[in-house]
Amino acid sequence: MEPVLIMGGSGQAGAGTAAVLRQWHPELPLTLAGRDLDRVRKVADGLGAATAVTIDLRRGDLGLPDGQGYSAVVAAVWDSHLNGLRYAQGHGLPYLSISNGLVDLAPEVFAVAQRTSAAPVLLASHSFAGLAVLAALDAARRFERIDSIRIALILDELDAGGPAAVEDLDRLTAVTSAGLVRRDGVFVWVGGEEARVEVATVDGVVLSGQTIAIPDVPSVALATGAPNVRFDFAVGESAGRRGGGPASVEVGIDLEGTGLGGTPLRVSRRLAHPEGQRPLTALGVALGVERLIGLRGEPVAPGVHAPEALLDPALAVERMVDAGTVLTDT
């Protein structure tokens, strides 16, 4: 098999993804691409069966050497000019991206819509590349009907990620401060006081947060049929750091509806990783790559795909727990 090309291969998401793929598939060749060859080479040398190249996202050929083939292209950094996507389409390669917010997905979607037969494209700009969605869908299987779903993510203020992740966050927050929710079956924008919320950590501390616009909202809403869906986000000191450990990350998923036989049912699922967001994002991307290049499941058809369309929620939850995620349901 040709190597998987990971753009942003020396960043937290890219290097983390490469490490997970190496753990699962020791013989899978990888090519890590970045602007600083020394940094990328250091990551590649630590993996084995990996090479390092420089990349220029402003160029249509990405500045890559001629004659080298790839099995997939992963944009673990913002594909600012969409040249990574166009490169993948031009070479018939699967493509996965994680850095587009809900409000700037349109150019990416149109690029795929113009060349639907080129290759499969996985749009995974969700929280943790889709893992929160998959965890919600796994919990949703207990329901006959779901009336509401609330997902709340708590990020430690010391766990904002690397420079590229900080740039992404600044870019996305500059576009809109409004959140997107599904209310009584209708997707609506909320802002101001309506978007301000309180989010409780696993140890009971309440943080100020806000409802945000993120692909998780339409993904969860349309996959479950829930008429009321929201995604809340708060930044502050995590329970892990408050307890004397490293910065942790938390996700709360609250579902309400009816169970089998029509009895009222409410499920609260809590996910926490003691090492913060990096392991979960890397895991989500690695699951997508594994699926796109045929290492698990049936071949993926060309066109645009969401994580929940390709990945098994139960497997995702199993892999999260294996990776050190603490999961509790009440």
Image: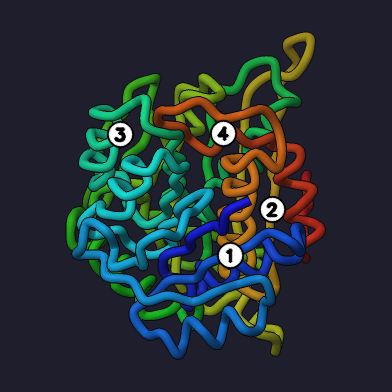
Where's the C terminus, which quadrant?
top right
Task: Give the residue pinned by disc 2.
Answer: 270
Mark 4 — residue? 308
Work out how far the residue at label 1 is from the one at label 4, CA to CA, in angstroms: 25 Å
The answer to whether residue 56 shows anywhere in this view is yes
- Total residue callouts: 4
The span from disc 3 to disc 4 (Cα, nearest Å) is 18 Å
How far apart marks 3 and 1 lie (CA) works out to 25 Å
Q: Check residue 112 in the rendering and tell me which mark sits there, or answer none.
A: 3
**Residue 20, position in %: x, y?**
68, 64
Q: Are marks 2 and 3 in contact (CB under 8 Å)?
A: no
Residue at image coords 40%, 61%: 209
**Residue indicated by mark 1:** 30
Q: Amino acid at mark 1?
A: Leu
- Of tags 2 and 3, the one toward the viewer is 3
Which SS class for mark 2? strand
Q: Earlier in the sequence, mark 3 or mark 1?
A: 1
Residue 303 in the image, given as x and y percentages of width and height: 40, 28
Q: Indicate the secondary structure of the residue bearing disc 1.
A: strand
Between disc 3 and disc 1, the foreground one is 1
Locate residue 161 relative to residue 163 in the image: left or right.
Answer: right
Apparent side of residue 113 relative to residue 264 in the rendered image (left or right): left
